[in-house]
Every structure is written in structure tokens, then in C-alpha cells.
Amino acid sequence: MKNIFKISYRNLLRNSRRTILTASLITLGVVFVLVYTALSGSFKTYMVGQITDSMMGHIQIHKKGYVASVDNLPLDKNLKQKQLKKIEKFIKNSDMVESYSYRIKFGAIFSNFVSSTNIRLNAINPKDEFDSLPLLKDRVVGLEKQELKKGEILVPELLAKGMKVKIGDTIVLVANNKNGSVNGINLKIAGIVSKISGPGGRDGYIHINDASKVLRIKGVEVSEIVVRLKDISMLSQMVKELEPLSKILNKNGKPAFEIHTWKKLSPFYNIVKMLDIMNIAIQIILISIVLISILNVMIMSVYERIKEVGTIAAMGTPPKTIVKLFLTEGLMLGVFGAILGSVLSLAIVNILKLAQITYSFGKQSNLILNPTLSGYEILTISVIVIVISLIASISPAIKASKLDPVEALRTN
């Protein structure tokens, strides 16, 4: 086998220009795919982080039927204390859960004593909410010590501008409870929640005790439980762990709870899927480049070395050995291109990190690009390149092995 590698290496060096050109095309293909993967991965990580860490959490648990009617923010589908205890047993016993938070979601009338408008509100326990949504703190402007106290409200930026209210102002919040009873409460604006793209990006926040007061809720009652995992990669595993919860039945013999990941709740998951599809498309382009490049080199190599192949065949070299020679040449080209492409990609990605390039996403600007490449991504692309290099070499190698020695030696 050593001799086959030596002979194949020398054959590649015999036509160095063509070898360098082919290896360069493969290298460029690998660089293009890996750098694109790193850039799209940076954007995807940021986008997912913004959705899960500032608005939605990783998993949400509701009463069955709540999500289907969420646009109406139904208060009659809130989870009661007994139901919450059942859910907490699953959450507290899991090693994958980092934190969780209760929310009451409802609509209300927001008045500055001059004019009124509608507002969507999340009633929260501040500590639990900020633990479960760590990036939410970064969206709040003006909140002292990142604590939302009773009697305070966090107003979405767009509403604050439209209603011409500022931090420190007092407003009136009027809401209907599930029985249709109207109640109002005075609240002080403690902070402004900056805008963000996507559902939930324009919601206000109040203390959960204030929500219970204005909605006249007795006891413990919440719309949803937001769960944050220690690692988002555990998402599928956690959903499986929560499956028994979704099988608990209510008095009517129907499922009492529904469990949704951020992927099911956020329309931005479609963008994430599009990025993954684009990654596959780019990889197909890479495969095409490698396939055509290697195939072209091997076919030309066969035609240029017809007499040489005829000579070694006439000397008794088995067809299998001839096939191995050409396959090894293709393998070497693939390995060289994959290694060089990976090294260059890592260098480019590190340069982009140091450059701290900024970009905009939705209404947010000056976001720093943070491309990263994992060993898995590099290994996957490298394996694809090497395998395709071998596949592209099969046809020319078989053709060379089937050459008639007499006919080959007669060729001019």
C-alpha cells in the first residue's frame, strides 16, 4: 500500500499545475462553505438567543387549548394551584431545568389621564422572570437595580412614545377579569422596554401581585409557565421527560396540559429552518465543485497516461491495483483540499472575530458578528469532500483498469 501512495503522489506532482488548480478549487469550496456556516451560525445563535432569553424561554407549559386562543389572551384558561403543583413536580425533579417563571398574560386599557390605548401585559414575579429570561434585563431602560416592584409597570418603547409618557409618570391600567368585571389600578412607570422583532416584543410588564389585584384573582392562578434549560441542546430530551405531563387528563377525560417549545411558538423558527436549508444548498454546491474538479483531473490523467497504464498492465499489474492508484490520487486531492480549506476557514473566522464587524437585525443595530466553527462542522465538511473525491475517481479508475494493454501501447 505504501508503494501505491508513493506512485500516486509522484503522478500528482508530474502535472503540478493541474494538481494545484484542482486542489485550489476544492480548498475554495471548503472555505466558502465553512465561512458561510460560521456566519449563518452566528446570526442563528443571536436570533435564537434573543427569542428564548428575552421573550419566550425554552419551553412553555399551558392549560390545554390556551395556545389556540392566545390572541384573545383568555383568562378562563389559566392554570390553577393544584395544576401548578403537578407541573412543578416534573420541573423541580429535572436536572436539565435551570429556572422557571409564572406569568399571567392579559390585555388592558392604558391611560395617561389624557388619552387611552390598548396594551398587552405580562404579569411576572421579577426575580424568577429575570432568571428565566436573562436578556430581558438588557432590554429594560431605567429600571433601578433590575427590580420591578409592586405598583410599577414596564412600558414598551413604542407605546411610551405614542402616549408621550416617561419614567416616573403615573398611569391608569383598566382591565376586565374573566367574569367581565372592570377594575382599575394606578401604576408608576419604572422602566421602558426596548423594542425587538417578533411576537412578545411589544409587551409591557407588571408585578404578578398587581395583576391579581386588577383582575381580582383569588389564590394562585397563571396563564403559563416559562422554563429555561441549562443547555438549549437538551430541548428534545426535556420534552420527552415532560411527555407524561401531557398525558394527564382533566375531569372531562381530555389532556389537561400542553407543552410547547420555542420552535412551535415562534415564527422565527421558519427563518432558522431556511438557514439550515441554505447550508444544505451550499454543501451541494461544494459537492458539485469537488465532483467536477476531481472527475476532470482523473479523466485527463487517464487519457494522458494510456501508454503508461498499458505498460504496467502488460507487466502483470492487476486491474485492482490500477484502480487503487487512481482512487488514491483522488483521495489525496480531497484530503489536501479539506485540510487546507479547514485551516484557512479557521483563520478567516478568527480574523472576522477580531475585526468585530457589526450588523443590524430588525430594528436593532450595532450587533457584533461572532462567527464560530465547531469541530463537528469542520469534520462533517471534510468527510463530505473526501468521500466525494473518492466517488469522483471511481469511473476514471475503472476505465483505466479496463484498458487493453495491446491497444494502449499502440496509441500515439
Image: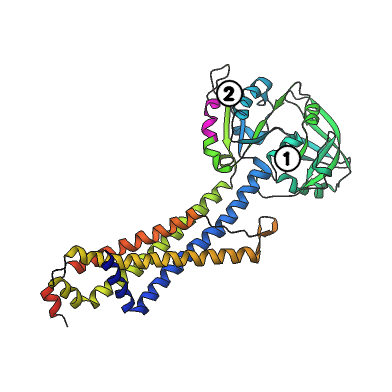
Q: Which quadrant of the view contains residue 16? A: bottom left
* Type of the residue with mark 2: Ala
**Residue in the foreground of this view, choosing between 42 and 221:** 42
SS at badge 1: helix
Q: Which quadrant of the view contains residue 311? A: bottom left
Residue beneath disc 2:
256
Outermost residue to the bottom? 412
Residue 237 in sight in this render: yes
In this figure, what is the number of numbered marks?
Answer: 2
Q: Who comes first in sequence, dot 2 or dot 1?
A: 1
* Type of the residue with mark 1: Phe
Whole-percent x and y of residue 240?
Answer: 51, 32
Whole-percent x and y of residue 289?
Answer: 39, 66
Outermost residue to the top? 251
SS at badge 2: loop
Whole-percent x and y of residue 409?
Answer: 14, 78
Whole-percent x and y of residue 260?
Answer: 57, 35
Q: What stretch is highlighted in magenta?
A: 238-250
Residue beneath disc 1:
130
Residue found 32% across the figure and 74% down from its top = 12
Picture layout, residue 86 above or below residue 4? above
Residue found 53% across the figure and 31% down from its top = 241
Secondary structure mostly seen in the magenta stretch:
helix
Residue 66 in sight in this render: no
Distance (Cα) linking label 2 and label 1:
28 Å
Picture layout, residue 329 above or below residue 234? below
Question: Which image quadrant: the N terminus?
Answer: bottom left
**Residue in the foreground of this view, choosing between 186 and 13:** 13
